Image (tube, grey):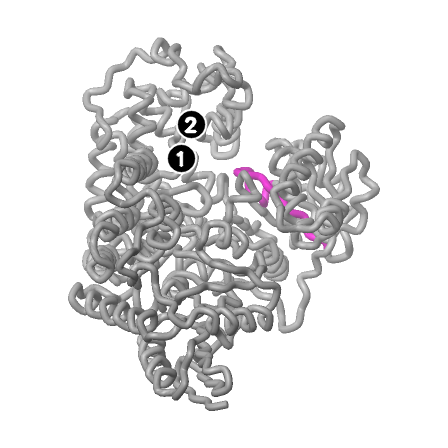
Amino acid sequence: MTTHKNAAFECSFEAESGIATLLLAMEGKTNKVDRTFAEGLVDAIAWAKSQAGLKGVILGTAHKNFCVGADIDSLYPMRDPQATFDYVKGLNGIFRSLETMGVPVVGALTGSALGGGYELALATHRRFAIDDPGVQIGLPEVSLGVIPGAGGTQRLPRIVGVQKALEHITQGQPVRAPKAKQLGMVDELFPDRDTLYAAAKAWILANPKAKQPWDDKGFKFPAPAPTSQDARNIFMVACAMLYKKVGNTMPQVEAAICAIQEGSVLEFERGLEVESRWFVKCAISDTSKDMIRTFWYHRNAALKAEGLPALGAGEDMGIQKVTILGAGMMGAGLAFICADKGLTVVLKDINEAQLAAGRKHCEAELAKKKHLSAEARASLLGRITFTLETAPIAGSDLIIEAVVENDEVKHAVTRELEPLLSARGIWASNTSAIPITHLAKASAKTDRFIGLHFFSPVEVMPLLEIIRGEATSDETVARCLAFTKLLGKVPIVVNDGYGFFTSRVFGTYLMEAVQLVAEGHDPVLVEQAAKQVGMVVPPLKVFDEVTLKLGHHGILQRERYLGQNVSDIPGVKLLKTLVEQHQRLGKAHGAGFYDYPQAGAGERRIWPGLAALVAAKPAKTGIAYIADRLMYIQVLEVARCLEEGILRDKRDAEVGAIFGIGFAPSSGGPLAWMDRRGVANVVAKLDAFAAEDPASAASARWKAPELLRKMAAAGGENGRFWPRA
């Protein structure tokens, strides 16, 4: 056995079989695509080719994962177009040298292959993976504001076809190994590493003349051919769907579509050049920089709970048994995700029908776990006790209260059930707005009373907003952060105050939409404007889903806690009219801003009677004006949360807004959104909105906080929330 090693690869050559094995073994625990990787791959290929009797190459990893993709620390500062183009052109040249080295090359994906790592695998002639749902495969680059830049937009369509490649690349969602096999993204699955490597050797020896399909003169794209009418229709539909969903706010997705379409009708080498040019345009843009900052740096910092209380070395979070109070959609969802992570769960309700609905919800979620065996499914559901009684709660390490949003009810429940906690037990409220310090008045253990604000649907939404009351201890915060990590949620920790952070900002978004309708703006335009600026959900639609009844209750509750009478604001009047006089309570009740016909009777549509409730006519309107109103009201509330100290860290503004309430993802978050426009310009715009809406209660809505005015006056780097990338 002949061996060789460089900074990125461990290489070996077995003379008997003629097969070289190149294992990615970069410093640390992960393999990533950077200059060290590129130089190491060049050296490894040259070394393998120098071995006498070489018959093939297995490209694998010495680490847990194959390769996690581009080195973000290298990608983030890229601003020079020519230097960026030269870098990806060089990387493409190296990958081409791998797939044209004259012998068969097999990619051995014994762990996840993402981004540039999967692009490396695409440059092999055959891709074998471990049959493990924990192995992730794919090209998630659009989630960081870029596109695949090492051949992904050119190789994948030539392997799986235009439509599958478009769907995968533009959605940016990695898939589990079994799904990757189904899509054709990997060729074979094997139960373990040894079996995979044995099969790789056998395939190499059985296919001595293997080469890439696109290097064959007779190559034809998987149907439909790129120049066919069917393919043109696919591209047109992709563009239409993109525009309908996010308008012009996701330039990287548009670039990916263009790279695939333009490159697919060219020779492969020219297709790579097209991809490189689109990659450069995205990589040096503000969109990419802001998305990388939030989706990579801020998100990772939140996941690591940087700067937050932590458990001591070897200390356990002390949470094994969890009780959820309230078996609604949120409570049932919480019970399921806790049980899915191996915890013992009690789901308690006072209504038998609601409890049955909670069980049905858990069973429906369980049915989605198709990769689990029948035994594992039974075990998961068996960890949940569905009960109307209080006795099963005894000894719970964590009780999460998810009952009706009423402080008197919550106080009563706390007094009754808190004594059933274990010695170190924590009481958490899932309230979306009521101050934790106020709710803790009913507690005998205020240091272990905390807010855990989950988002619906809890099985899907990644954020957990942790609210620290005045008496909440560091230990309680640390234990809840460990619990958050177990659930796989992204945490932000905020200080107490009515509405905390996310509910305050989300509330302004929803109520500004109602205000716009009350002023006479077309509700269809309001919904479309939200899409055009990249908001994940249009406001009137999502208001119906969270229910107008809850929004109406929130206004009354806000008045009670803050002493702010907002009843003279037209939007508030309209909401009260809809709820109190017309019983339009939201989607769950079949009527809100939209009509919801019975199944099969047609699509939802804006309620025609809405126009009769609005007599006003706006002095000016249009998509741009409405969009500005919807966005500026949100960033204004974010600035207030910063100034008031509700937000403890600026990163939480970005993470909380994007992952919790669907703030325009491509913006990088509300602070980045203000940076791009200039804080001075933001203040001027707020002042303009206040001037055109002079009623005392209305103009106060647009008053810029001193935080923004001081930043605007300072200018330069002091006038930005984040340093320029």
Which one is nearer the viewer's eye here, 331 or 100? 100
Q: Badge 2 is on which residue?
A: 541
What's the residue type where badge 2 is placed? Lys
Quadrant housing the C terminus: bottom left
Q: Which residues are magenta?
A: 425-438
Q: What is the number of the mark on residue 393?
A: none
Q: Is residue 645 in view from this perspective?
A: no
Residue type at the position of mark 1:
Val
Q: Which dot marks residue 537?
A: 1
Visible residue check, residue 439: yes
Secondary structure beneath dot 2 equals helix
Q: Residue at x 44, y 14 (%)?
A: 577
The image position of residue 302, as x and y in percent, is 47, 59
> Based on the displayed image, in which of its 4 quarters is residue 368 positioned?
top right
Disc 1 and disc 2 in contact, CB within 8 angstroms: yes
Q: Is residue 547 left or right of residue 531?
A: right
User: Of all residues shown, which one is farthest toward the right?
Assistant: 391
Q: Residues within 10 Å of mark 2 (few under 14, many from 20)?
A: many
**349 vs 288: above or below:** above
Q: Is residue 142 left or right of residue 468?
A: left
Residue 299 is one of the magenta-drawn residues: no
SS of the residue under disc 1: loop
The spot of residue 494 in percent (x, y) is 49, 51
Residue at 45% over, 53% down: 184
Near-viewer residue (687 or 650): 650
